[in-house]
Amino acid sequence: MSSRSSRINRRQFLEGTLAGMATASLARAQAPGLGTLGANERIRIGCIGTGGQGGYHISLWAKMPDVRVAMVCDVDQGRREKAAKLAGSSPDMTKDFREVLDRKDIDAVLIATPDHWHTPIAIRACQASKPIYVEKPLSHNVREGQLLKEAARKAGVVVLHGTQQRSGSHWGNAVKRIKDGEIGKVSMVHAWNAWSPEQMFANIGRPRDEDNPPPGVDYDMWLGPAPKRKFNPGRFHGTFYFGWDYAGGMISDWAVHLFDIVMWALGYGFESVSTTGGKFVHDDMRDTPDTANVTFECAGYNLHYSMRHGNNWPPHGVMDHGIEFFGTEGTLQIDRAGFQIYDEQGRTQRKPRYSEKDTVDDSFEHKRHFLDCIRGKAKPRCDAEEGHKACIYGHLANIAYRVGRRIEWDVAAENIPNDADAQKLLTRTYREPWTL
């Protein structure tokens, strides 16, 4: 989603602009060049996971005349009923994703579940020959990304990773300028997320486990491959984001957008990663840090990523997220609002030589791009292989944090040499029957 104000967080932006974006979606979908599509040409999508991000996708696809949301799947009855109304197409409903994959009349699937379900469902969707739009991060761990990449290649199906910035025009232009050498040799990159406590659940607390989940929730299916444990509201809708069993917090779940752009501009790969930080702000049950600094040693440059949940003062007066590429001839500073280039010789004036604003709804464009891929008109801008590589940065940063030391990375073998504890965190133990 495109956030255009440093004071508007992701959820507020979603709520505040949903109606306007839906209207824009319809206008673009009906624009000249897309043609008038008959009912038999509509792409029928099954949506698996209908919470905040899943519901957002459904709201946009529901306005596109060449798409029909044919089925909605969620383990929470209330959420799937709400999603069915949002779709406006009287879709079938189910709590079991396998029913979606078994449907021969469903052309493609959206996977917008909690992270620990992304790859297990996506691999099965590959086996069912269904094109896949899978939300970021593509995987819960590195091994999952490897398996999904292999499954997609074997099945020959379209997989589009939900790093929608790949479909934003100003992102693509900035990347091209860096590749063309406009700012010279890049020796350092700084990426950041600076979010206030209110933006990241000010206090999850330490609620007790409960014997029963909320009515209408199939909690065992929600857990899926994760370890069996009692229901706890602090590890459920929204807050699952901060538990190692289900996700990786900001470092793997949001920063993947930033790592993906760095990778796109400078190429994939790093030799080592170290992470410092901790829970310095939130005294609650979350596992993931609320403050962290990460350093990747890459070939010819260093990549620094900083993250904080206790203060959202925006660096250099820009938004609460962004990337700065420092080159010998200039600095390129970019976020979802646009980018600026500052010449090195004129750095004291702090006036950009070039500036470009965001004029494209990249989330809408990414969905249209997915449809083009399904129709054979385009190749995915971020497929399973690219998505897997982009996710490795966050997964390795989290591993370095969890083991408490610098770790080396063998890019070719995709392995952590000489560190058995860190190697174990490249995968997980899967609960039956959801083994990969």
Image (cartoon, rainbow, N blue to C red):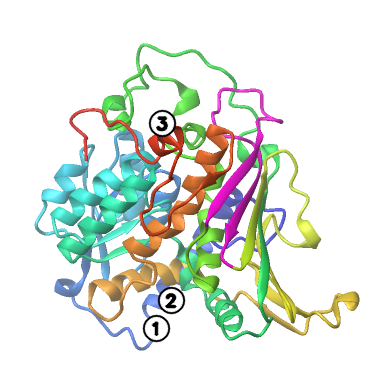
Q: Earlier in the sequence, mark 2 or mark 3?
A: 2
What amino acid is at disc 1? Ala
Q: Residue at x 58, y 33 (%)?
A: 404
Tell me which corner region of the image, top left, top right, bottom left or bottom right, holds residue 225. Answer: top left
Q: Is residue 63 above or below residue 49?
A: below
Q: Residue furthest bottom?
A: 33
Would you say residue 283 sits in the magenta stretch? yes
Q: Nearer the viewer, residue 240 or 361?
A: 240
Q: Residue at x 61, y 60 (%)?
A: 3
Identify the residue under disc 3. Answer: 245
- SS at mark 3 in the image: loop
Q: Earlier in the sequence, mark 1 or mark 3?
A: 1
Residue 162: image location, x then y, percent? 41, 59
Q: Pinpoint residue 286: horizontal percent, then vertical percent.
A: 55, 28
In this view, the residue farthest toward the right is 348
In the orientation shown, which residue stands out farthest toward the front? 418
Q: Residue at x 56, y 23 (%)?
A: 285
Q: Dot 2 corresponds to which residue? A: 27
Q: Magenta includes 371? A: no
Residues shaded magenta:
271-299
Distance CA(mark 1)–CA(mark 3): 44 Å
Residue type at mark 2? Ala
C-alpha distance separating marks 2 and 1: 6 Å
Q: Secondary structure at mark 2?
A: helix
Residues at badges 1 and 3 in contact (C-beta under 8 Å)?
Answer: no
Q: Which residue is mark 1?
A: 31
- Front tag of 1 and 3: 3
Q: Please tell me in which quadrant of the rendered image residue 184 appears.
A: bottom right
In this picture, residue 97 sits left or right of residue 5: left
